[in-house]
Image: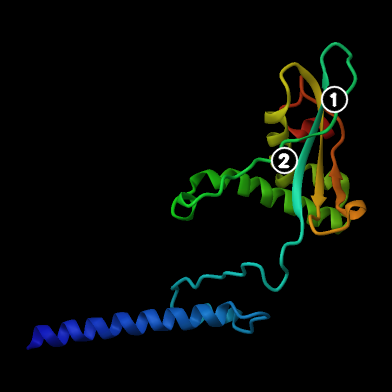
């Protein structure tokens, strides 16, 4: 009899905790939420903060383009898109560890977009962690034997008219590859 009461109480507690968690998650994720201080009522229990696409859905893609100066004084190569692709299949819904690298690069490119939109000083931008991450990805994509590279972040609006589909965000200076271990040394 006592065992049934304990099991019943534990089950009721679990259902109540799950219901409280779901309600607080919904409240936390309402648009323009006034519940930002809701965490102080949960005793340290984390409440997910999902925003998905609202209230500002993404309407553009950010692409990373690179061009290099080959050794031997040849002219610069044309721009080429080195944006990493992430495969999307039914297995990736359950397990997709390969998405972390491209997501980190995408987040860095988004931060550089925000800095550019807010007219941040270029010297400050070149010393930021997002710039260093994008430079590292660009350097990894550079052709062997290149002596310098330049990268370009480009916003692509797929639903815009063709003449308004692409908008440059940020173009790096030419970065020498033979002596640059990081962009701060090349920019300084």
Rendered image quadrant of residue 19: bottom left
Q: Residue furthest top?
A: 72
For disc 2, the neighbor class at 10 Å (few under 14, some 14 to 19, many from 20) is many
Q: Say left or right for 27 vs 137.
A: left
The picture places residue 178, in percent across and down from the top left corner, at: 76, 19
Secondary structure state at the residue bearing disc 2? helix
Residue 175, image x and y in percent?
82, 29
Give how far across and how far down residue 114 sits, in percent.
Answer: 79, 57
Can residue 7 be seen here? The reply is: yes
Examine the image and state in which quarter residue 71 appears.
Answer: top right
Q: Residue at x 80, y 42 (%)?
A: 126
Q: Residue at x 51, y 49 (%)?
A: 89
Residue labelled with disc 1: 77
Q: What's the mark number on residue 134?
A: 2
Q: Is residue 105 above or below residue 17?
A: above
> In the picture, which quadrant includes the C terminus?
top right
């Amino acid at each position: 009899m006592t065992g049934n009461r304990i099991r019943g109480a534990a089950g009721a507690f679990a259902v109540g905790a799950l219901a409280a968690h779901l309600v607080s998650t919904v409240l936390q994720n309402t648009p323009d939420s006034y519940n930002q201080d809701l965490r102080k009522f949960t005793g340290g229990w984390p409440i997910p903060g999902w925003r998905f696409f609202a209230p500002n859905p993404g309407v553009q893609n950010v692409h990373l383009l690179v061009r290099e100066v080959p050794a031997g004084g040849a002219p610069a190569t044309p721009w080429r898109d080195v944006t990493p692709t992430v495969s999307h299949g039914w297995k990736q819904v359950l397990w997709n560890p390969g998405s972390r690298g491209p997501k980190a690069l995408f987040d860095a490119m988004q931060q550089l977009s925000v800095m550019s939109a807010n007219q941040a000083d270029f010297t400050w931008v070149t010393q930021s962690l997002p710039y260093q991450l994008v430079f590292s990805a660009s350097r990894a994509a550079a052709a062997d034997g290149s002596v310098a590279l330049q990268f370009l972040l480009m916003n692509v609006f797929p639903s815009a008219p063709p003449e308004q589909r692409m908008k440059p965000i940020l173009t790096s200076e030419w970065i020498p590859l033979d002596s640059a271990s990081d962009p701060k040394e090349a920019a300084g």
